Every structure is written in C-alpha cells, then in structure tokens.
Amino acid sequence: MQPIRAQLKLTIEEELTEEVLQSNVDSLEKIYIFIHEPRITKWFSSANIKEYLESGKEPELGLLYKAGVVQIVETKQWSEGVHFPQMGPKAIKILRDIKEANGFLITNGEYSAMMTDIIEIDHFHIGKVLYEMTAKIMGIPKDSGFIQFVPAAVRTTLAYPTPIQTAKDFNLALKSDDFNALKNTIGEKELLKIISTDAIKNGTPIVKLLEQIKEGLKKTKTVEKVKSSFAGGVYSDGLPWSGVLAEIDTKKHKWKFAAHIANKEPKNVPALIKEYKQKSKNPNKIELAWNGGYILNPELVGKLGLPETYIGSPLGLLIMNNKVFCPPLFNKPAFIIYKNGDVDIRKVNCEAGLIVKGKQKNIVFSSKNYNKHSDSEACFYDLSYSEETFKGNGNVIIRIAGNTVKQIIKTKAGESVPAISVGITLSVPSNIFSSTMFKEGMPLDIQLLEPENNPFKWDEISYAIEAGPMLIDSGKQILNMEDEGWKTSNSIKTQAARLDFTDMRGPKIAVGITKEGKLMVLMVNGRIRESVGATHFDMVDILLKYGMDKAMGFDPGGSSTLVVDGNIMNISPYNKNYEKDIYSLPPEPRFVANAIMGWIDD
C-alpha cells in the first residue's frame, strides 16, 4: 500500500477512496504479486490471494485490485523464491518490464534472502529467521526479523557453506564510512551501478570492492606488483564458476621464485611462506605464492602399505637451489625457474638418464637402460613402467623416494622384485654396486642428463616442480592424460592421476605464461554456492581467453591455495573444525607439503 499512497500524496489520516483512485488510476505504477498457480501440494496459492483481495477485509487493497493497479501473476513454480525456467513467459515478460522501468521487488518469507539474491533488479527481503541454517547464511541470530535492501544482481552471502561474507556483513558495509564517502563523491546511483556490474562479472566481496573503487578514484595510484582480481562466469551448460586471477610481469620487474617443501609436516601456504623466510633468511616480501606439486600423504602411504618414512615424499620433479630432490617420475609438466630469472612450463621426464654421484665414483644410468633390465650396466625405472615386477637376476635393487634411499634388495639369479608405485627404482649389477654410496635413509646426489631430441640445460635451473597436467602449449589446448603417464597402473595406485579431475569439476589452480613474459595464476573455487569448480578443460578455456601461451595445472582440490601480498585470495570449501558447526564456518586453507613463492628482487 505504501508506494501507492506515496504516489497519491495521501497523508496517514487520509483514506484511499474510489473517487481518489479513479481520478489518478492512469498515472499510478502497477504492482504485481507473483505467486504460483493452485495445486494440491501447495496449501497457499494465487487463489488464496485473490480470495483475500476480493473479501473486503482490506477495502483499499480491494479497490487497487479491482482497478488493475494491483495484479496477480500466476507462475508455474515448484521451488521457493524466483526460478526463471519455472515462472513462465508472462511472468518473465513482466519482470523485464519492471527492470526496464527501474522498479523493485519485495520478497517475503524466511527463504526470500536465499532464493532471490541474484536477480538483476533492486529488491527488499522481509522475513523472520526460524531455522539455524538461515541464521548462519544471513549472519544474524535465530528468531530475528529482517528487512534488507539488496542492489540489483548482488548476492549478499558469498561462499556458503564457508562464507567470506554474510548478509549481515553486506548490510554493515552499506552503512560504513567507505560507502558513505563514495556515495558523496560519485553519487549513490552510480555507486550502486558499479556494485551491480561487479556482482555480475566478478562477485567481489563488498568490502574489497569498496576499497578497489576508493583506490581507483585516487589521483596517485599505488603501484601493484601483483595485479589480482576476482573473476567469474557461467559455463555453456549454465553452471556458474568464480575464482581469482593474479598476474605479474616477469619482464617489468626482476622476479625470483623458489619452491619450498614443508619441514617435518604439511602446513598451509601462509605458514610455508613464514617457514621459508625463516629458513632462507630471505629479506624480500613474498608477493605471490600457491600450492605446488603432488606428494605422498599419510593416507596414501597407509593405503599402499608403505613405511611411514615415505610420508611427504614428492611425486614428481623437485629441484631447489640447483639441487635435485626428486627426479622426474612421469612425463608431466614442470614449472621451471632458471638462474637468470626466466620462467618456463614444459614437460619433463628422466628418459635421458641420470648420474648418481659418489665420493670415489659416479654411476651412470643411461637412456638405453631406461625401464629395461641389464645384467652388465646400471638401469632404472620410473612410474611409467607398467609391469608388476622388475627383473632382478642378481642385481641390487634400490628403491628411492625423492632423492632418499628407502630400501636396498640384493636379488639372486632369476629373481624378480615387485614394483611399487612410488619414486625411481635403480637396478645395479652387484659388481658395480657400492655400499658406501647407497645406504637406507641416505640422500643421493643426483644429476639429470640432457635429452638429445629436446635439449635444455638442467644446470641452468634454480627451481623446478613437477605437477600437471599440461594444459596449453603454443597457445593451444594439449591436454593428454595418457601421454603424461596419468593412466599407468602405478600412477593410478598413487592417486596422483585422479583421472576424475579431467571431467569432474572442483577447486582447481593453474599457472599460465604469455609470450611477452606475463605470468598468471588462475584459481577457480569449487564446492561453494557460487562456483561448481572447473574441469581441466574448463581451465584451458579460461586461460586461453586471457592469452596464455603455456599453462599447467597444480595439485587441485580443497588444498588449492593462492596467496597475494600475504592475503589468501581463493575461497576454501574446507574447515577442519566442521563438526563443531555443521551449518557454516569460515574457510581455511588446507595443509599442503610444498609451495611455490615469488618475490621482486630489489
């Protein structure tokens, strides 16, 4: 009633009569009541509204209904709130008319705040919180009443069930000093338009967005070492994704990167940054960091029936400070950091062979003895080897995980040894074997040999970490799980493959490089309300839109983490204390075994 009375300039004491209405009816804006058509399963429907308006219980409402100022719009909805496919063409046309006329919606009921919060029309939520879940989503106590204004297209609660913004948080932001200052500077209408536009394109949390708008208005802008922004979209199948993009220019600044593996036990990426700075005494501020490659976690080690000493071992190439901590294990891509600061993404493997260095002598494992037995020369096997046993036949079998000797087996003539799905396996004839060079628990000094057909200098690499899969090369999608060794029996046993990641959407993280030297980290959130996540193919599509020439994935899932300037940018769908509150807890990064970190070398 109030919008109508306001248009007619009626005081609180004045009654709306038929005479007043008839002389003004043509100038009044329409009010539409959207409600589902009568059906057995719904106790309340359009028929009940119509009966009430015609009953005479509210004479003024009855007059408006009779004059056509108030109209009932029947929908075919089964769901609560607004569900466009179920509304029917008449209702959608009227909604479009309301939008074009800068009208607004009023939604009533407890679930209104959850079911109408992405409509591109300004709207008000009115209701009372009766259930705990609604209270958690909105960020207000149970049994609270609420009236809330929501600008067009805005989703007030972000990232449920691990919210980074509740409806209450959004409400406080609209009453904040930042909002009022911006409103006075650019005008409320323009400010709300910016908020709505960002909600459609990026979904930036409101507090962060207000900071960005304020920064954009400054005459002297802060130089961003890492450009970061929220991003989002809708896939061709209609499902939504959201995430974060971080971009740096490796040519404009002298960037350096390092890979750090956790001491003793896994930690989250911020903790790994702190640990790395303490250990390396690096005085520079870590500007960019993300979770790295695949490792053997406790669950996997137990599943494979391996000793606990295998926990934390890398499942791919790991070079740190020019030292090989793990040779390549498959044919997967590695993020490579050269001594001169250049970065690259390329597939790596150990087919060319390797050298184990000793104090008295070196043992060469040549390419001709790769995944193949020899009685007279040292030979070696990686995880691309598909047989269930290795031929021993008198050789000494040395199992290594990372660069550490885990087991030494002296075989007899004709004896075979079971293959395990971890690390490199060395096979050395007994007359070459050195008990001083190979001891259980001892790290090996490993030098990787250059491949002849695709040479690059291993000794020019400062850091490298193998992960995968390779997503883009030369500006084209080249995803090939089979070629990279993800489908071998050993790979599948270690779960490093996780073939479901190819076709299953979830949290993902990937790094891309342009020909011009720009590096971009893309983190797509998953398992939250705004984002179904991404498949590897989805990641390819997004990265290609941003002009990436090369790109690779890193360890996906709930452990995917992106940190910029000390701030966690992505939204984890995880909180280890979830049993304490089954409805909602703030997101927290999961623990990982290693991370890649970047800084500007001043």
Image (spheres, rainbow, N blue to C red):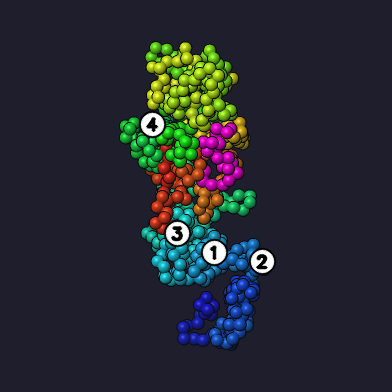
Looking at numbered disc 2 in the image, what kind of residue is underneath it? Gly
Query: Of helix, strand and loop, which one carries label 1?
Result: loop
Looking at numbered disc 1 in the image, what kind of residue is underneath it? Thr
Q: Residues within 10 Å of mark 1 (few under 14, many from 20)?
A: many
- State the residue position of label 1: 116
Pointer 2 or 3: first along the chain: 2
Pointer 3 or 4: first along the chain: 3
What are the residue bounds of the magenta stretch?
488-509
- State the residue position of label 3: 583
Pointer 4 or 2: first along the chain: 2
- In this view, the mark in front (4 or 1): 1
Q: Nearer the viewer, residue 258 or 225?
A: 258
- State the residue position of label 4: 601
Pointer 4 or 1: first along the chain: 1
Cα distance in 3D space between marks 1 and 2: 16 Å
- Label disc, if present, on residue 88 of the rendered structure: 2
User: Picture coordinates of residue 10 (x, y %)?
Assistant: 50, 82
Q: Please determine whether, in this image, residue 304 is positioned above or below residue 83.
A: above
Cα distance in 3D space between marks 4 and 2: 60 Å
- In this view, the mark in front (3 or 4): 3
Q: Residues within 10 Å of mark 2 (few under 14, many from 20)?
A: some
Looking at numbered disc 3 in the image, what kind of residue is underneath it? Tyr
Would you say the residues marked 1 and 2 are in contact, meaning their CB atoms lie under 8 Å apart? no
Given the current orientation, which residue lies at the most extreme right position? 89
User: Picture coordinates of residue 359 (x, y %)?
Assistant: 38, 14
- In this view, the mark in front (4 or 2): 2
